[in-house]
Image (spheres, rainbow, N blue to C red):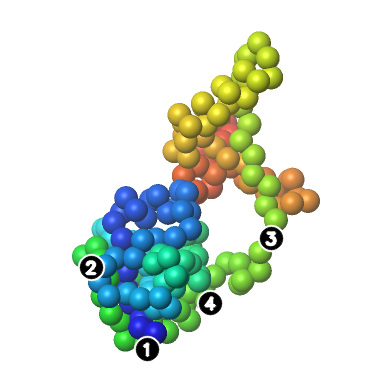
Amino acid sequence: MAKWVVVVSEKQYEAERLYGAGGISVPEDGLTVGDEALLVAAGESPVVFGLGRVDAEGRLQYTVNLLDRPLPAGGLSGEVGARRLDEDAFLDVARRASADSPRGGAKRTWLVSVDMPIEAASPGEAVRAFWSYVRELGPAELPAFVWPAGDELAMQAYVLGAEANQDPEED
């Protein structure tokens, strides 16, 4: 199994950050099933946003997801595409990613809610209007409220995948 750096465009990174598509298309640069890659976002401040492995469908599936806490890419950035990486450099980043991983591999149950008042003549009309607003506003404008199951007091609002203060009286 070869080790790679796969650099994606800023636009593709934003789509991953917002929607977590769950699989990045493999550039046609020699990656094969089982190869591992560091996933790097191009841009002014490039970051490593995950580690992945090529699956049987030819997509990179996350083995470590760093979308919530990306690492500085340092010298790993460059043009969009894939290039080989030596095993020591890959393992160095993999160790840092594991040490910095906020979840440490353990998953929790989270409750996510989007609430908005909707005026409608019927419940069906209200539901249709709700989904229209969700589609129209999307993650750039519509806050989602997130909290660990059983701890409603820990509820936080998120916009664009980042914590966002929704209290109009606070800065």
Q: Tell me the SS state at disc 3.
A: loop
Spot occupied by residue 103 in the image (x, y as percentages of width and height): 61, 67
Q: Which residue is mark 4?
A: 99
| Residue drawn at (25%, 71%) of the image | 29
Mark 4–mark 2 contact, CB under 8 Å? no
**Circle 2 residues within 10 Å: few <14, some 14–19, many ≥20:** some
Look at label 2 and name its amino acid.
Gly
Look at label 1 and name its amino acid.
Asp
Q: Gap between marks 1 and 4, in whole Å?
A: 17 Å
Discs 4/2, front: 2
Q: Gap between marks 3 and 2, in whole Å?
A: 35 Å
Q: Gap between marks 3 and 1, in whole Å?
A: 32 Å
| Residue drawn at (56%, 22%) of the image | 129
**Circle 3 residues within 10 Å: few <14, some 14–19, many ≥20:** few
Look at label 4 and name its amino acid.
Ala
| Residue drawn at (50%, 70%) of the image | 64
Q: Which residue is mark 3?
A: 108
| Residue farthest toward the left in the current orientation of the protein | 79
As rendered, which of 122 and 57 lies closer to the eye? 57
| Residue farthest toward the bottom in the current orientation of the protein | 88
Q: Which residue is mark 2?
A: 78
Spot occupied by residue 80 in the image (x, y as percentages of width and height): 24, 63
Q: Which residue is mark 1?
A: 88
| Residue drawn at (35%, 83%) of the image | 2
Q: Gap between marks 4 and 2, in whole Å?
A: 25 Å
Quadrant where the N terminus is found in the figure: bottom left
Q: Tell me the SS state at disc 1.
A: helix
Q: Which is more N-terminal, label 2 or label 3?
A: 2
Residue 76 seen by the camera: no
| Residue farthest toward the front in the current orientation of the protein | 56
